[in-house]
Structure formats: structure tokens, C-alpha cells
Image (cartoon, rainbow, N blue to C red):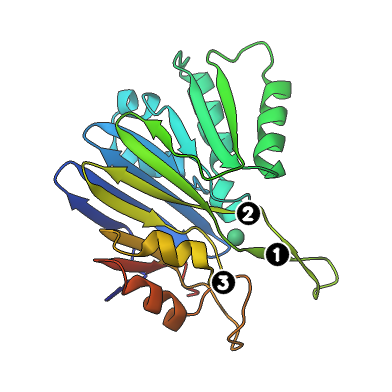
């Protein structure tokens, strides 16, 4: 078991790896999956542009063609505007795909605002790819298998909750699987996705003493799922 709240978390096997720059509830997430020289950005929260530019050349950052979003909460999408605008300023030419769960209005709103503000000066094409099923997506030799998870948010009465469109992703490359559950309560789809994965990245964001927390998992619950994978890290742990 690796309980770690110090970031970054880096895991690598052969040519496949993941770096979690951070995953702090209500602050920011930022993740890069890499297979050989190919980079996929996952949940670009605030600070992602700084973190990518610390680790990679400008050319590498501009070569990123795919962003995967688990859900629209600010700590998972806060850096999307920065990335879109950076690519514009750098006169990027390559297309950009943004994959996100069906119904995630945050991504559509950021995209629409970006199009509106910079309508005459966007140098590249953006394709919004809404995910509504579990169909595998293949990007640069990496298979990405989305799965629905269970996440909620509290409404303005501070009591009632609504379900947030949310996905986890299994990234498969060269026979290895990295499972990232995003933000989720315990759910069967996550249990299935994490089982036998080479690495499972599991949130343990619950601040509730109740066992039936339907927004996040407790450390104990996340660990119980993590043990079914070959290795696991707990992230999104309240500090
Ligand atoms: Zn969330």
C-alpha cells in the first residue's frame, strides 16, 4: 500500500507511465499519462500549464493532442482555459481533442467562451468529444477505456445533492493498465476497472464519517479496491 499525499506521484514501467502533479480536493488535479513520447493530459486543474512547462519542452507541450476530463468540477478543469489560450498564443496548428462525460456543461461552457473571446485568432481546431458509453478510444497506441462512476455535488441549500456526469478511465498500453477513477463514491464499475490493473489511482476524498458517502470514498474503502490492483496510490485525500 502506498498512501501518499506528497506530490508529484510518478509511476513508470518500461515506456508507460503516469505523473500526478497534484490531486488536492477543491484545489487542483493535474495528470499526464505517457507512452513513449506521447503525452495525454488528464484532468487539467489549475497549475497544469506551469507543471507541463517545467517538465517538457514547448514542442512537447504543443504536441499534446488529447485531453481527458473525468468531470467538470473546478479542481479538475481549472487549467483548461490556460491550455486553450496558451495553444492559441503559441500559434499551434495541430488539432486538439477534448474527451469528457456527456452532460459536462463546464467543458462546453469553457469552449464556447474561448470561441467567443478569440473568434478571429484561434490557430488550431478543437474537437469536443462527448463520451456517452463505455466504448474504447484509441489514441496513439494507448487504449482508453472510459467507465461511469458515481459522483455528486451539494446544491445551494447546502443539503440536497445532484449527480455530476463523471467518468473514470483505464489507460492500456503494451499489455499494462493504469486505472484512474476520478472523483467517485464506491461503485461496481470502479471495482471492476481497478481489478488486476497494474496501477490503480484511487481517490479517498471522503470527509464524512458515514459509510454511505455517495460523493467520495473513505481511505478504507479506497484501499479495499486498491488491493485488487497490483499497485495503487490514494489521491485526492483531504489535507
Ligand atoms: Zn469532484
Using the numbered discs, state the Cα–Cα distance from disc 1 to disc 2 in whole angstroms. 9 Å
Mark 1 and mark 2 residues within 8 Å of each other at the beta carbon: yes
Does 146 appear above or below 92?
below
* Residue in view at x 39 percent, y 29 percent: 64
Helix, strand or loop at label 3? It is loop
Relative depth, front residue between 44 and 118: 44
Return the mark for residue 153. Answer: 1
User: In the image, is the residue at mark 2 within 8 Å of ligand 1 by its beta carbon?
Assistant: yes
Q: Determine the image quadrant of residue 232.
A: bottom left
Q: Determine the image quadrant of residue 143.
A: top left
Q: How many marks?
A: 3
Return the mark for residue 216. Answer: 3
**Which residue matches tag 2?**
73
Using the numbered discs, state the Cα–Cα distance from disc 2 to disc 3 in whole angstroms. 13 Å
The answer to whether 54 appears left or right of 185 in the picture is left
- The outermost residue toward the left is 14
Q: Residues within 10 Å of mark 2 (few under 14, many from 20)?
A: many
Q: Residues within 10 Å of mark 3 (few under 14, many from 20)?
A: many
Using the numbered discs, state the Cα–Cα distance from disc 1 to disc 3 in whole angstroms. 10 Å
Q: Residues within 10 Å of mark 1 (few under 14, many from 20)?
A: some
Percent across and percent down for residue 206 are 55, 77
Helix, strand or loop at label 1? It is strand
Amino acid at each position: 500500500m502506498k498512501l501518499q499525499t506528497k506530490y508529484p506521484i510518478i509511476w513508470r514501467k518500461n515506456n508507460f507511465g503516469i505523473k500526478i502533479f497534484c490531486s488536492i480536493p477543491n484545489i487542483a488535479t493535474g495528470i499526464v499519462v505517457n507512452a513513449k513520447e506521447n503525452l495525454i493530459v488528464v484532468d487539467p486543474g489549475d497549475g497544469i500549464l506551469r507543471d507541463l512547462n517545467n517538465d517538457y519542452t514547448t514542442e512537447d507541450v504543443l504536441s499534446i493532442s488529447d485531453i481527458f476530463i473525468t468531470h467538470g468540477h473546478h479542481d479538475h478543469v481549472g487549467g483548461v482555459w490556460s491550455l486553450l489560450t496558451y495553444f492559441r498564443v503559441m500559434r499551434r496548428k495541430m488539432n486538439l481533442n477534448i474527451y469528457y462525460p456527456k452532460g459536462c456543461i463546464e467543458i462546453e461552457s469553457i469552449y464556447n467562451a474561448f470561441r467567443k473571446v478569440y473568434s478571429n485568432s484561434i490557430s488550431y481546431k478543437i474537437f469536443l468529444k462527448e463520451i456517452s458509453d463505455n466504448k474504447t478510444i484509441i489514441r496513439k497506441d494507448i487504449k482508453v477505456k472510459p467507465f461511469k462512476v458515481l459522483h455528486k455535488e451539494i446544491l445551494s441549500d447546502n443539503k440536497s445533492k445532484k449527480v455530476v456526469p463523471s467518468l473514470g478511465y483505464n489507460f492500456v498500453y503494451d499489455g499494462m493498465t493504469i486505472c484512474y477513477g476520478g472523483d467517485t463514491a464506491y461503485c461496481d464499475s470502479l471495482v471492476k476497472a481497478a481489478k488486476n490493473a497494474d496501477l490503480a489511482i484511487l481517490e479517498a476524498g471522503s470527509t464524512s464519517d458515514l459509510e454511505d458517502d455517495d460523493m467520495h470514498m473513505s481511505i478504507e474503502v479506497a484501499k479495499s479496491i486498491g488491493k485488487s490492483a497490483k499497485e495503487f496510490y490514494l489521491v485526492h485525500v483531504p489535507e
